[in-house]
């Protein structure tokens, strides 16, 4: 059986993210903390992360770096600010020293990858919410996102806007990147396609009532429209998810959040890419 336990460790930066930490999170939960030592995994922890340095060295995209930041006559990035599309990364092998079965390792691997990007001031990999495809896309100026309809989640505008400078991922590009980086499972970052199961190898469809397993992708809509998803999160356990939002529960960007309120009532369905 898969179990994920949390140690009590609330870093000082939590006060920067939100002073109402104790009121938001149950006892024992440390949010905004990127240290993998804060989490108890059933698999050998080093087996989950040992290849991160090597995978960080892989090209995130096939687009040549000198083409990433080209602009049009209006000064807008010619790719409309989304940045280059992600390349398909190779699938890792389950280490022989994993200390758990292959399916459990893959689920915990997804959580370990997702938590690398928690938006913490002390975390150089931390990401905010941006309409970008890869975490390496780091524009020095505002990005022109003229394709808001691609991912109309709860934080997306109804019209074109400019995102602030810097790296980030929106909800479905975050889920796509985590699976691509973590397991070499490549599907598109379009939330509509993910919800429909047409984005790529999305795996097994799960009903809105679950039961869910760690790493499952849960789709939601703020208006309860069962025909269209507007947001996607990664399931951790019955009380927690990790996702990318502009700001939710007083937390900015990619964060572990409580699975309560809208996160629980607006569930449409889920997919389980891990067999």
Image (cartoon, rainbow, N blue to C red):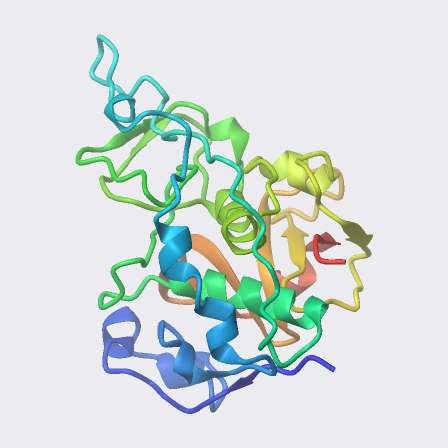
- Horizontal relation, residue 123 to residue 34: left or right: left
* Quarter the N terminus occupies: bottom right
Q: Position of residue 266 (x, y in %)?
A: 67, 56
Picture layout, residue 106 above or below residue 15:
above
Q: Residue at x 33, y 85 (%)?
A: 10
Q: List the single residue furthest toward the left.
A: 140
- Horizontal relation, residue 123 to residue 211: left or right: left
Q: Position of residue 142 (x, y in %)?
A: 23, 33
- Horizontal relation, residue 265 to residue 251: left or right: right
Q: How many numbered badges does the structure rendering display?
A: 0
- Horizontal relation, residue 126 to residue 74: left or right: right
Q: Position of residue 36 (x, y in %)?
A: 41, 76
Q: Residue at x 25, y 11 (%)?
A: 72
- Answer yes or no: is residue 238 visible: yes
Q: Quadrant of residue 32?
A: bottom left
Q: Residue at x 37, y 25 (%)?
A: 63
Picture layout, residue 171 above or below residue 6:
above
* Quarter the C terminus occupies: bottom right
Q: Residue at x 42, y 91 (%)?
A: 8
Q: Nearer the viewer, residue 106 or 82?
A: 106
Picture layout, residue 111 above or below residue 156:
below
Q: List the single residue furthest toward the front.
A: 96
Q: Quadrant of residue 106?
A: bottom right
- Answer yes or no: is residue 117 visible: no
Q: Position of residue 150 (x, y in %)?
A: 53, 29
């Amino acid at each position: 059986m898969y179990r994920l336990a949390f140690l009590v460790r609330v870093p000082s930066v939590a006060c920067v993210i939100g002073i109402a930490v104790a009121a938001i999170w149950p006892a024992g939960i440390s949010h905004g903390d990127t240290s993998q030592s804060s989490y108890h995994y059933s698999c050998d922890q080093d087996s989950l992360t040992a290849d991160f340095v090597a995978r960080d060295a892989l090209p995130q995209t096939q687009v040549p770096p000198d083409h990433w930041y080209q602009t049009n006559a209006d000064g807008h990035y010619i790719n409309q600010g989304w940045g280059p599309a992600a390349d398909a990364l190779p699938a890792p092998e389950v280490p022989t020293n994993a200390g758990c079965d292959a399916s459990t390792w893959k689920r915990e691997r997804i959580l370990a990858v997702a938590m690398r990007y928690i938006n913490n001031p002390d975390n150089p990999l931390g990401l905010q919410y941006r309409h970008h495809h890869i975490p390496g896309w780091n524009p020095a100026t505002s990005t022109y996102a003229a394709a808001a309809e691609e991912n109309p989640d709860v934080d997306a505008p109804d019209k074109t806007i400019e995102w602030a400078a810097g790296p980030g991922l929106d909800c479905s590009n975050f889920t796509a990147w985590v699976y691509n980086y973590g397991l070499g499972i490549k599907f598109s970052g379009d939330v509509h396609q993910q919800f429909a199961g047409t984005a790529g190898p999305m795996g097994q469809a799960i009903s809105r009532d679950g039961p869910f397993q760690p790493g499952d992708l849960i789709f939601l809509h703020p208006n309860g429209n069962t025909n269209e998803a507007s947001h996607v999160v990664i399931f951790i356990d019955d009380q927690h998810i990790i996702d990318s939002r502009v700001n939710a529960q007083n937390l900015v960007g990619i964060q572990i959040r409580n699975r309560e309120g809208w996160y629980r009532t607006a569930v449409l369905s889920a997919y389980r890419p891990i067999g």
